[in-house]
Amino acid sequence: MCSEGWTSGDVLDDIAALVAERNRIDALLARRVRAAELAQAPERDGLKSMASWLRGHCRLSAAAAARLVGTGRVLEHLPALAEAHDAGLVTAEQVTIAATALTPQRLQAAAEQGVDLAVIDAVLTGLAVEHPHADVVRAVRHYLADLDPDGPEPDPTEGRRLTLSKHADGSLSIRGELDAVGGERFQAAVESFVQAGRPAGDERSRAQRLGDALVQLADHALAAGGLPTLRTVKPHVAVVIDLHDLADPATGPEAGRMGFGAVISAARARWLACDATVSRVVMGPDGAPIDLGREQRLADRHLRRAVELRDGGCVFTGCDAPTWWAEVHHLVHWLDGGETNLDNSALLCERHHSKVHSGFRVERQPDGRWRTWRPDGTEILAPRPPVPAA
């Protein structure tokens, strides 16, 4: 007997029914996403793709948004699999596996070789409905091997993947894949730090030593100063912290905000400050940096720093572009008498910088929030999460 009066059989049946219902909802959602993509609906909100719209307006991760868009596309080519997905018999994950076989290049190769997609559709659908997930993966791999058994040497960059997943505490999970040559280069670089940093009595695990070595590799690259310049600024580790917290010897949890959004303690910020340049930025009564720009058309590095500190990324509603993708925009154009200062500046990615010069408008409210309007005067509003029932 399970809790809340459920029998074991009842709760398992309910779980199976919920999974089927989720599959049906996933299928409906994928079809709606595909319809919106074909209609170029994201342009209404100033965005280029459904993936970016899903990230900005529905708060999906980049990977989840890409999978959803890919699912919508693959359903058009495999109607039997799509029907099974609609019926709740096939999961979105299974459809995602099938999507790897239906890239534009592979569809073209299949057409050139006279491959009947209806047969592939039937086989994959049968496996997805009646067999374990691993069988679908093996079938797709076998199909791809048959599609190009003796083709040219594949481009090694096509198989390279790196996913960075940030957690609530600012820590980072890393997952990726490299081709043989790229993996060899990576191992050679990281292993040099592993072997050079093994003091006597080191009790760290192999995984811990590799993690430390990866951070040391990043430190070395940043300190060398040879990395590409991003928007007039060299790559660096930045921490914004109140002067009182920095000077106070207490630990001070969650006192410093880093450039990529992580929050760290004052103690950790002081540790970083021991080997860093400390810049003083005076904040106004509204919590924004004071005007650091001079009377010139282009924002200098001081003004850009102030805008980055205040805005934290592209301010266009629904956009999640970080500071290093963004440009400093004059809210009132310089040619129209607008000044180059903080109050007249907004951080916008290249696409949305172009949009606001083509009819869209952004405006900062007295409370510090940014709002965005379409050329027709209607406001772009990101959907708010539902309020839980009392």
Image (cartoon, helix red, strand yellow):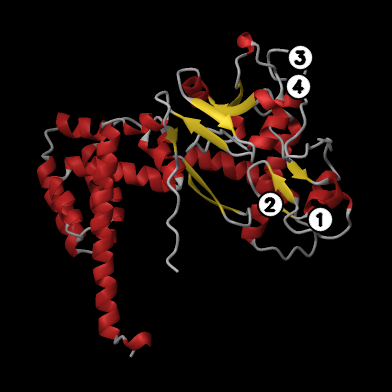
Q: Which mark is residue 329?
A: none
Q: Residue at x 72, y 66 (%)?
A: 203
Q: Which residue is mark 3?
A: 295
Q: Which residue is mark 1?
A: 267
Q: Position of residue 24 (x, y in %)?
A: 23, 57
Disc 4: CA contacts within 10 A as few (<14), some (14-19) or many (>=20): many
Assess whether mark 3 and mark 1 are in contact (beta carbons under 8 angstroms).
no
Q: Is residue 154 visible?
A: no
Q: Secondary structure at mark 1?
A: helix
Q: Is residue 51 left or right of residue 140?
A: right
Residue at the extreme top: 335
**Residue 51: quadrant of the picture:** top left
Separation of residues labelled 1 and 4 (CA atoms): 31 Å
Separation of residues labelled 1 and 2 (CA atoms): 12 Å
Look at label 2 and name its amino acid. Answer: Val
Q: Nearer the viewer, mark 1 or mark 3?
A: 3
Disc 2: CA contacts within 10 A as few (<14), some (14-19) or many (>=20): many
Where, quadrant-wise, is the C terminus in this rendering? bottom left
Where, quadrant-wise, is the N terminus in this rendering? bottom left
Assess whether mark 2 and mark 1 are in contact (beta carbons under 8 angstroms).
no
For marks 3 and 2, the one nearer the N-term is: 2
**Residue 186: quadrant of the picture:** top right
